[in-house]
Image: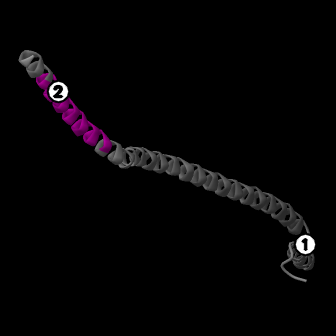
Amino acid sequence: MSDETDTLQDLLRQAHETIKDLRGLLREAAAFRAALPKLVEEAVGDQLKEAAVRETAAYFAGIDKSIDDATEAVYQRFDRLYASLVGELDKRADELRRTGADEQSAAVRKILQDRGFTS
């Protein structure tokens, strides 16, 4: 019986050591589990930050392009209006050259009045 008792005591000691090791592993696992949300937040936070910076830059680049395109369209429209006005003034100037000085003054006043510069 002594051999059996020694064997049982040895098995019991091994079982206690294994349980002790398991408890240590459980503590490590619990510590890792407790730290996991912060680790995930840091990893995902960095990725989100990079994505936000990248997407914000693309968004502002699009806004800048839209502003530039709209500005260019406005300038082109003013150029067309200016060219139209100059062409009309050139036509009127040709008419003025064919008329007398009094008629020229009247024509200039008419152009200015038509354009809203005088009443």
Nearer-the-camera pick, 38 or 60 = 38
Nearer-the-camera pick, 84 or 51 = 51
Q: Secondary structure at mark 1?
A: helix
Instruction: Measuring from the top left, give residue 53's x and y in whole percent.
Output: 46, 50
Residue at 19% from the left image edge and 27% from the top image edge: 15
Residue at 61% from the left image edge and 54% from the top image edge: 68
Nearer-the-camera pick, 106 or 46 = 46
Mark 2 sits on what residue? Answer: 12
Task: Answer with mark 2 or mark 1, whichever residue precedes in sequence.
Answer: 2
Cβ–Cβ below 8 Å for labels 2 and 1?
Answer: no
In the rendered structure, the answer to whether residue 61 lies left or right of residue 19 reads right
Instruction: Measuring from the top left, give residue 43's x and y in whole percent.
Output: 37, 44
Query: Which quadrant of the view contains residue 79?
Result: bottom right
In the rendered structure, the answer to whether residue 1 lies left or right of residue 30 reads left
Instruction: Measuring from the top left, give residue 112's x and y in whole percent.
Output: 85, 76
Q: CA distance from mark 2 to mark 1?
A: 112 Å
Q: Which residues are magenta?
A: 9-30
Nearer-the-camera pick, 97 or 1 = 1
